[in-house]
Image (spheres, rainbow, N blue to C red):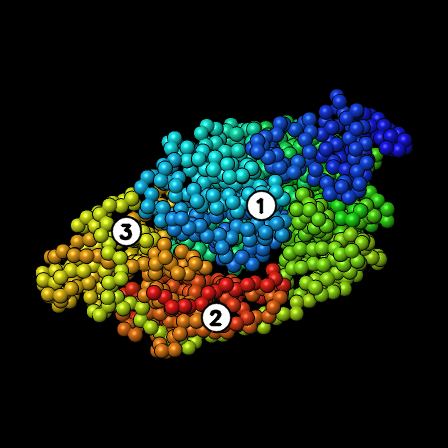
């Protein structure tokens, strides 16, 4: 180090020791120790330990000042390396890439607030669209995604593991790495997720004799191949190897007792670690269960899930109160680990007959996010994942009986992949968390119920929690209403400690407003950028960081409220806002200026601009129109990851979505994203940016008008316009006409032969619930290889004339149905809101053929297996009795080949059922229907009675490239006695139960639909009563966006002859 730098360093250390320096915020006291690239958190922790600070500080500064500028820039505002004031770190002992203390995770020695959302790739079986979801999550400010993997889909039969096509793990990892988002992998074997058997392979529910999810040998043998496959695909993609996987969860939502369960967890953990998984193993407790923290099966990092609003979307405006004891619970059960919520409510599932997912979005809307998410922050949680962030579609046999095809979940990203208002609130919160290095490490100081030292709240209706960074003394006051469910508006003032002494906020107006069901985060002594600091703010932080050479602060607040913040305004060529509703107050002898924002401010306001600072304010809606994409680093495994590869960003306002941004060597800022309308562009970018392109097209930009109101131009803000060239009307879809029809229930005809069907003659079963009555034969579909979707049963008896009826108990799960025929005569359909239903099916006069073989045909809809302890669900006929006779033989048929021999390996084991048309492949593209009769779907079945028929038609699409068009198939919304399966290019993408509901609209994505060619749609119509039905179906365009994720491939194998 040069002598001059040595002299300067000692001079600055002496200044730090002076009492005069204590008047200034800690960040300002330390910012001049090196260039503005210095990791402030490293230096502040040295300062906090002043008994040895001087020699260590000198050594550190010598090291920092000798680093290249590029290295220091990569760490700006993010490096959180080990410091004496940090607690000891923990790791798996296998690798130190991921560590943790009682505050947070560390990844590559950097402290990180893990902010995540749940996405199940199996619910979006188009791999090219996974990047779309990941990009949207990153654009919202999230840095991680939680992903369940479905054992039953990837291990469809004993000895078969399939990670091809949409089951690929490598495709997930590659897309996540490209987007710059970490992965918490949750491969089960049990996942819950409102999916059949909770994700456990169906064959295991039948073949495993022992209790599932224990250390039983036969259960361990069932999952070993699957878990080995997960390990082999994941090991190369752990963050220790430059990949995105930072943790692996063990099973899900379970109990540590009895010991067989704990030992099952221990076996899983040993398998993962023996196979090469070195990242932490985690657990998701169903509530405050205290499971797997210590003892047998304990994981590295414990967490719990919470759904405080419940799942009653029928009353979406009815709130439950926030949970108050999370901080206390964490302090009691795992205080040495960071506080982790692997699942916090991001929406709600909706049951059969429910109100629909729009109501679920209201139940967990932006106001819920505002209050409940920040309450989690107040509990000092630093690892949080929202379930769901994108719900998707429970297509085929994926759902458990409690839910229907849509798994929209009322999420921030809707099933169609459209962004909801919840996405905006998520982004407002997440970009603050991304901006605030201080918030990554906080101590819980107190709250309204315990008292907060040095804090006085004037207003009993306000509830305040104080978190404080122990290294910088930054304070975070998280405020909500004492009655968190209240819709009334309140106001309060608060006296708080700051680096300039105790202050009462606000100082320029009477009280801080807090609307009903609203929460705010007030801050004191919060740094922004390289050298600047807020003394305090009652407005919310949207963005705080450095762009080019300016420290940038973007605040927001409701337009009908007053807001106040104080900071030291610095720099040359300074310009202040001239708006009448922005007031500046300076105080003699103080360097801080108080800024008051009066009610009525809407849109973006430049409060202050200089060569070193830019301070912005807007209303919340305007703030949500801004994006802050990461400018990737030139190289490195994590070059696309904010904080770990790059800390360079821009602010851009106006577009519907900004997916990514790069700056070329020539100074072109290349943006890619989506438009839903022509948008006015606002850009804050480095001065090195000389031109701008949007999706490859050059866009002119000019300097914005100066904030002074007296002419002139801004040197920090540029504006332009993004013109949407594509019109919504250009995305044209045809009417669905020219239907062809064929009967799909030949099984009731006298000439039908079931010689090739399986004889249902088992007398024992591993399924927990045993047959209720009968002759000892077990009639559970999964015991014969037919575990999902529609299964047909044929019971034979030789007619004597004394047979009068058959008594059947049929088990299909919630909202199932079963229709019964004697020979070719329909008797009736039973259904139930519960698991099963019983009925006596009286034979019509003369229907029994005396001296001949008679057949009782039962068509049964299997709605999926239950979850939790009921995965071994008794789907089938648990009870039968022929009144006046005996059934001599039962035959059973489900999907062609059962789970061992199903032919469609691409769409997978849960796509098809046992209808005759499905077994023949009528639903597949390329099947020749030219010999079928023409019949409109609206005409229903020719008989006008109960039965099953297939309707098939084709249509062409020609959708403009560089667009993202959301489409749905829409049935009539009429209560009619029919059930329908919707097949789109062979994919079972909808189950309509018209007399139960609620779903009648089925979103279908590009990749399932061929946007540039021919498509086949098939409807398997099951009329359940002896009355005519008149379904309708149309294809509609829900939204047209210009842009999109890029080329989306189609993988829809066509029909080939089936045996």
Residue 431 position in % (x across, y down): 65, 47
Q: Is residue 939 left or right of residue 1?
A: left
Q: Is residue 429 left or right of residue 1005?
A: right
Secondary-structure class at tag 2:
strand
Q: Which residue carries the number 2 mark?
A: 1015
Q: Residue at x 43, y 52 (%)?
A: 153
Distance from the alpha carbon under mark 1 to that under mark 3: 41 Å
Q: Residue at x 39, y 43 (%)?
A: 222
Packing grade of label 1 (10 A; few <14, some 14-19, many >=20) is many
Residue 675 visible in image: yes
Mark number, residue 39: none
State which tag comes first along the sequence, 1 or 2.
1
Q: Going by the picture, which residue comes out furthest to the top? A: 51
Residue 888: quarter of image = bottom left
Q: Is residue 378 left or right of residue 403?
A: right
Q: Residue at x 87, y 30 (%)?
A: 6
State which tag comes first along the sequence, 2 or 3.
3
Packing grade of label 3 (10 A; few <14, some 14-19, many >=20) is many
Distance from the alpha carbon under mark 1 to that under mark 2: 37 Å
Residue 328 position in % (x across, y down): 52, 30
Residue 448 visible in image: no
Secondary-structure class at tag 1:
helix
Residue 999: quarter of image = bottom left
State which tag comes first along the sequence, 1 or 3.
1
Q: Which residue carries the number 3 mark?
A: 780
Q: Nearer the viewer, mark 1 or mark 3?
A: 1
User: Which residue occupies the foreground of this view, 276 or 925?
Assistant: 276
Q: Residue at x 32, y 58 (%)?
A: 894
Q: Which residue carries the number 1 mark?
A: 237
């Amino acid at each position: 180090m040069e002598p001059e730098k040595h002299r300067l360093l000692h001079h600055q250390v002496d200044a730090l020791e002076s009492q005069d320096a204590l008047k200034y915020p800690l960040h300002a006291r330390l910012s001049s120790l090196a260039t503005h690239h210095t990791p402030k958190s490293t230096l502040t922790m040295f300062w906090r330990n002043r008994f040895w600070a001087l020699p260590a500080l000198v050594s550190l500064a010598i090291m920092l000042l000798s680093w290249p500028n590029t290295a220091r820039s990569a760490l700006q505002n993010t490096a959180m390396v080990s410091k004496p004031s940090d607690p000891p770190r923990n790791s798996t002992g296998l690798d130190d890439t991921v560590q943790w203390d009682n505050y947070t995770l560390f990844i590559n020695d950097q402290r990180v607030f893990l902010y995540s959302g749940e996405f199940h790739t199996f619910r979006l079986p188009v791999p090219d669209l996974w990047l779309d979801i990941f990009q949207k999550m990153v654009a919202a400010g999230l840095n991680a995604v939680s992903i369940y993997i479905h054992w039953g889909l990837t291990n469809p039969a004993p000895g078969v593991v399939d990670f091809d096509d949409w089951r690929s793990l490598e495709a997930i990892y590659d897309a996540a790495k490209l987007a710059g988002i970490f992965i918490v992998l949750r491969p089960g074997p049990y996942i819950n997720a409102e999916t059949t058997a909770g994700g456990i392979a169906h064959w295991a529910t039948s073949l495993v004799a022992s209790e599932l999810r224990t250390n039983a040998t036969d259960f361990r043998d069932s999952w070993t191949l699957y878990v080995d496959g997960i390990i082999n695909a994941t090991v190369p993609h752990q963050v220790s190897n430059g990949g995105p996987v930072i943790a692996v969860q063990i099973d899900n939502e379970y109990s540590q007792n009895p010991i067989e369960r704990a030992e099952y967890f221990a076996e899983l953990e040993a398998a993962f670690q023996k196979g090469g998984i070195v990242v932490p193993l985690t657990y998701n407790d169903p509530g405050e269960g205290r499971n797997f923290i210590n003892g047998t099966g304990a994981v590295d990092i414990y967490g719990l899930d919470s759904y405080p609003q419940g799942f009653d979307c029928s009353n979406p405006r009815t709130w439950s109160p926030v949970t108050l004891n999370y901080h206390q619970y964490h302090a009691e059960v795992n205080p040495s680990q960071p506080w982790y919520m692997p699942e916090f409510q991001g929406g709600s599932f909706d049951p059969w007959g429910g109100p629909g997912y729009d109501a679920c979005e209201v139940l967990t809307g932006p106001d819920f996010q505002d209050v409940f998410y920040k309450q989690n922050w107040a509990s000092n949680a630093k690892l949080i994942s929202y379930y769901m962030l994108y719900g998707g579609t429970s297509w085929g046999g994926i759902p458990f009986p409690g839910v229907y095809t849509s798994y929209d979940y009322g999420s921030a990203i809707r099933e169609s992949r459209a962004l909801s208002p919840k996405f905006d609130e998520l982004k407002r919160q997440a970009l603050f968390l991304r901006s605030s290095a201080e918030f990554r490490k906080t101590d819980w100081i107190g709250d309204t119920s315990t008292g907060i030292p040095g804090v006085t709240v004037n207003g009993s209706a306000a509830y305040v929690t104080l978190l404080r960074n122990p290294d910088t003394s930054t304070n975070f006051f998280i405020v909500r209403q004492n009655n968190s469910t209240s819709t009334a508006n309140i106001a309060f003032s608060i006296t708080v400690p700051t680096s300039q002494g105790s202050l009462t906020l606000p100082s320029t107006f009477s009280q801080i407003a807090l609307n009903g069901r609203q929460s705010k985060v007030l801050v004191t002594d919060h740094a922004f950028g390289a050298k600047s600091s807020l003394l305090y703010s009652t407005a919310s932080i949207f963005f705080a960081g450095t762009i080019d050479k300016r420290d940038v602060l973007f605040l927001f607040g409701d337009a009908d409220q007053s807001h106040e913040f104080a900071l030291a305004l610095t720099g040359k060529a300074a310009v202040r806002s001239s708006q009448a509703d922005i007031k500046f107050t300076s105080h003699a002898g103080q360097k801080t200026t108080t800024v008051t924002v009066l009610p009525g401010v809407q849109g973006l306001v430049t409060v202050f601009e200089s060569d070193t600072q830019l301070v912005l304010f807007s209303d919340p809606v305007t703030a949500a129109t801004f994006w802050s994409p990461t400018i990737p680093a030139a190289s490195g495994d994590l070059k696309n990851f904010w904080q770990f590869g790059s800390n360079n960003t821009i602010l851009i306002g106006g577009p519907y979505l900004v997916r990514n941004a790069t700056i070329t060597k020539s100074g072109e800022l290349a943006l890619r994203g989506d438009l839903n309308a022509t948008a006015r562009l606002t850009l804050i970018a480095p001065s090195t940016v000389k031109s701008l392109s949007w999706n490859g097209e050059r866009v002119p930009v000019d300097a914005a008008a100066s904030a002074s109101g007296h002419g002139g131009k801004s040197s920090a803000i540029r504006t332009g316009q993004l013109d949407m060239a594509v019109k919504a009307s250009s995305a044209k879809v045809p009417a669905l006409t020219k239907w062809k029809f064929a009967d799909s229930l030949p099984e009731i005809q006298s000439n039908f032969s079931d010689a090739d069907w399986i004889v249902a003659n088992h007398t024992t079963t591993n399924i927990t619930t045993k047959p209720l009555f009968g002759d000892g034969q077990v009639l559970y579909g999964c015991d014969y290889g037919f575990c999902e979707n529609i299964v047909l049963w044929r019971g034979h008896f030789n007619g004597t004339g004394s047979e009068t009826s058959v008594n059947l108990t049929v088990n299909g799960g919630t909202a199932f149905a079963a229709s019964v025929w004697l020979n070719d005569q329909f008797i009736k359909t039973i259904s139930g809101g519960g698991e099963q239903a019983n009925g006596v099916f009286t034979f019509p006069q003369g229907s029994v053929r005396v001296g001949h073989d008679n057949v009782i045909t039962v068509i049964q809809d299997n709605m999926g297996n239950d979850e939790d302890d009921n995965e071994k669900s008794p789907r089938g006929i648990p009870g039968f009795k022929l009144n006046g006779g005996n059934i001599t033989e039962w035959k059973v048929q489900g999907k062609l080949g059962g789970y061992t021999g199903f032919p469609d390996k691409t769409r997978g084991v849960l796509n098809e059922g046992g209808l005759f048309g499905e077994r023949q492949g009528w639903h597949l593209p390329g099947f020749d229907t030219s010999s079928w009769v023409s019949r409109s779907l609206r005409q229903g079945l020719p008989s006008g009675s109960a039965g099953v028929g297939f309707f098939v038609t084709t249509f062409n699409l020609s959708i403009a490239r560089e667009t993202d068009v959301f489409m749905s198939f829409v049935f009539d919304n009429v209560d009619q006695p029919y059930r329908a399966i919707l097949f789109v290019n062979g994919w079972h993408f909808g189950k309509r139960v018209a007399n139960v509901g609620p779903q009648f609209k089925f979103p279908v994505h590009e990749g399932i639909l061929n946007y540039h060619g021919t498509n086949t749609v098939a409807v398997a119509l099951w009329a359940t009563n002896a009355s005519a039905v008149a379904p309708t179906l149309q294809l509609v365009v829900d939204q047209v966006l210009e842009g999109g994720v890029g080329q989306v491939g189609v993988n829809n194998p066509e029909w080939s002859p089936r045996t």
